[in-house]
Image: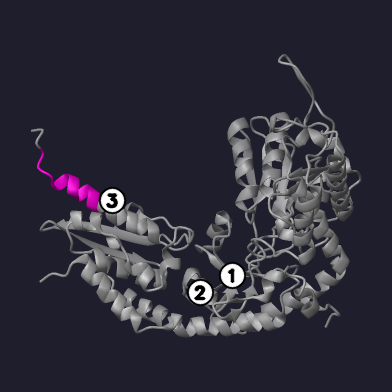
Amino acid sequence: MSDFQVTQIRKDFPVLQQEINGKPLVYFDNGATAQKPEVVIRCMDELYRTQYAPIHRSVNWLSDQMTTRYENARETVRKHLNAYSTNEIIFTNGTTSSINLLAASFGRVFIRPGDEIILSVMEHHSNIVPWQMVRDQYGAVLKIIPISDEGELDMEAYEGLLNEKTRIVAVSHVSNTLGTVNPVKEIVRLAHEADVPVLLDGAQAIPHQRADVTDLDCDFYAFSGHKVYGPTGIGVLYGKEKWLEKLPPWQGGGEMIDRVTFEKTTFNELPFKFEAGTMPFTEAVGLATALDYVNGLGLNRIIAYEEELVDYGMRALSALEQVKIFGRATQKVPVFSFLVGDIHQYDTGMVLDKLGIAVRTGSHCTMPLMDRLGITGTVRASLSFYNTTDEIDVLVTGLKQVIQMFS
Amino acid sequence: MIKTIDEIQNEVIEEFALLTEWMDKYNYLIELGRSIPLIDSKLKNEDHLIRGCQSRVWLEARFEDDKIFFTGDSDAIITKGIAALLIRVMSGHTPEEILNTELFFISEIGLKENLSPTRSNGMTAMLRQMKYYALAYQAKNKPNHAD
């Protein structure tokens, strides 16, 4: 067992200290959004009480303070991603808006009729729909990497899809439904051999994995603050400077401009040319605080502990004869998607809810993946480092009750 | 004597009053689901599907002797039980009665959380669909003075 002090760490999260329906809360919906540690809550509270002021423009002391903290937050993100420069860190509203920004901006410059965009069948709708919009606008073609029954990408098929018409590859670092950790370094290497840039959707990877963009050598990386214990409404788009320089701004407004006349507008420098309007600057600081918290615990220790949760969870769920698990990749984060016999996922979810176990049921915004698996949805238990093997036992006991009720 | 919608609602409330534990309530709903006036399997198509994010619900209505009769089904068992309850309360009444009904039994029996619009299980949509059927049959049934 690792030396991870989970009992102590749980105390950092006020939400976890309550009962739901008279039962201690078992929060297994971290894939949707993660809970916030006390330090993040306090940080936001303190900002609004003492430092809140507009960033970048105003000539006043408070504004200077707030601007410094916002730009320090950018540096914290840069360090966390091991990016080369803060010019490569663009704040957005979340992963979805990061991908929409990239797709719209990239599409405008680089996508022509007949060009190909490679996605995978396990993508979240947020990494499908923006590219469909680009496809429809510019007459491009989407090429889809298939998966094995275990939920792993078919890398041979991927290699076969790369060709001189490919303009970009956009795949998830970690699957939100299956928990699969994709071989993204290899994906990037192969794409680069074909001179194609890669976007990694890091929404699900950021709380569980190291997202070292220098090591991965990816060209773009998108993630959300709220899934890595930070506030909602803040996200990041990382992009290599050489790419971001070539991309036009997406939204127009304040801060992103250099000079505006009615005839012509010149745009601000990186990263500001992509940050139009008043940014969620308190949330950016909240995100940086969350990243500091995670790094304080130690990413290596988190990964080691979560591997224990994966092993324990897979074994415990597999021990139930009626449970069918979707996603048995060798490289996996503690996300368990499953169905119980022929019981509808919603029935399972509703009973688990009454037992104080928060899971998610449905297609998890991955309908093409559901089609591939031939099902309408699953029950998804997505765990975090503050979850325990005891809680997995509570889930297993709950599932036994579900089986009893519906058989 | 045919019971009014409100009388049936009170009947349901009395039945659920005996069930204090959520487990008993759910078990009762599962039982009720088995007694649902089942929609003809040929009608379980897109036209009769009420789209809910979580489970699929089908609903059909026919008009007979000035009254509306509903049949339905769902692929989730608890949802099917709730559908059975709604049908039991609303079926066999005139379009006017259905349109003028305020459903008070749902909150009384402690199932409100299952019907709130934030729970996208298609139940709110199902109720709305019942009222649409009533509205449609009411319009159809009115003598057409324009002739």
Q: Residues within 10 Å of mark 2 (few under 14, many from 20)?
A: many
Which corner quadrant of the image does residue B85 belong to?
bottom left
In this view of the protein, which residue sits in the foreground, B11 or A160? B11
Q: Is residue B143 magenta?
A: yes
Residue A183 percent across, percent down from the top left: 78, 59
Q: Is residue B92 left or right of residue A144?
A: left
Mark-to-mark CA distance, 3 and 1 = 34 Å
Residue B143 percent across, percent down from the top left: 9, 42
Give the residue type at disc 3: Tyr
Number of the label disc, if any, that sits on residue B132: 3
Region of the chain picked out in magenta, as a range: B134-144
Give the residue type at disc 1: Val
Q: Is residue A162 left or right of residue A20?
A: right
Q: Dots 1 and 2: beta carbons under 8 Å?
A: yes
Residue behind mark 1: A359
Mark 2 lies on a secondary structure that is helix
Mark 1 lies on a secondary structure that is loop
